[in-house]
Amino acid sequence: MTSLRVAVLGPGGVGGLLAVLLARQGHAVTCLARPGTARHIEEHGLRLTSDRFGELTAEVDGADRLAGPVDVLLVTTKATSLDEALERVPAEVLGDAVVVPLLNGVEHMAALRERYAAAHVVAGTIRVFASRPAPGEIRHEGQLLAVQLAPGAEPLAAALTDAGVDVTVRPDEAGLLWDKLCFLAPMALLTTRARAPLGTVREQHGDELAAVIAEVAAVARAEGAASDPAATREFAWSLPDGMHSSMQRDAAEGNPTELEAIGGAVLRAADRHGVEVPLTRSIVDELRVRPG
């Protein structure tokens, strides 16, 4: 196995989880974060508590700015802090590295390709329920950890597979990105509006959840993705009752949410294609003006 130099921009739940798994496989991992978090990671490493992998620790480097070349940059920040985080990665230092954003939404791809013109920006998604209770502390709930990558990041795909991640490489970028959004947008919007976990939403608002799934699937088809609302509904109903979305958690904690990156992106794509999404639009509009 070839060792990769991997920078993780945003070592929260997703980034911290992948940083631990890659570092334990012998890859050189640097976590890029705010100065206080970077110092903590440099001094104490990362600690993972996972239902799937158990209790793991890993020594990684911590830095507040990319200072040297890497093979792969994983972008794992929240959409709400992406612009600020990217200041930690100068384009001239990054060069022609492979950049893999594992972000919610679809609109970040164009922004990253414009900013890092010399790099190879490869679409990716991740399905996982992970959080960062404190700097350097990662919690991974359940067994789900599935990454999809477009062609161009095969060494990373191999490294993640060796680390125990479920990885698929697929050729259709639009399908890859919209498949996740077709599930994520309905779940995030409904759980956030209801201020309740997924089980409660399914029980009390199941018809609305299914309707939003169908609306987002129609937008995805207009964007060139072969969406399958029946499969999305089946997946949404297979998850544990207590599942919360990150948007719901952010709203409950009074933090900025990814409403625009998730729900807003669906509406903007719907408008481009003239697709009617009345229920999705009403929920997004309600959340845009609702405090907390």
Image (tube, grey):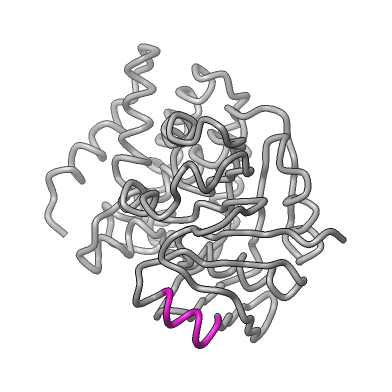
Image coords of residue 284 (percent x, y): 25, 39
- For the stretch drawn in magenta, the main secondary structure is helix
Closer to us: 88 or 52: 88
For the C terminus, the image quarter is bottom left
Furthest residue toward right: 1
The residues colored magenta run: 38-45
- Residue 43 image position (x, y, % from top left): 49, 86
Q: Can the viewer see residue 289?
A: yes
Query: Which residue is more in the foreground, 124 or 252?
Result: 124
Q: Nearer the viewer, residue 131 or 30?
A: 30
Q: Could you say where residue 15 lies in the image, as x and y percent from the top left? A: 53, 63
Q: Is residue 271 above or below residue 142?
A: above
State yes or no: residue 112 in magenta. Answer: no
Apparent side of residue 143 relative to residue 41 in the rendered image (left or right): right
Q: Is residue 216 above or below residue 137?
A: above
> In the rendered image of this protein, does residue 231 appear above or below residue 274?
below
Q: Residue 241, can we see it?
A: no
226 on left or right of 111: right
Task: Give the residue at x 49% y 31%.
Answer: 113
Pick whichever, 86 or 14, lies toward us.
86
- Residue at 67%, 27% (x, y): give it: 172
Q: In which quarter of the image is residue 98?
A: top right
Q: Which residue is drawn at 33% across and 65% down?
A: 249
User: Which image quarter: residue 26?
Assistant: bottom right
Residue at image position (63%, 54%) is 70
Looking at the rendered image, the quarter that the N terminus falls into is: bottom right
Residue 268 screen position, x and y as percent: 32, 25
Q: Is residue 164 above or below residue 85?
A: below
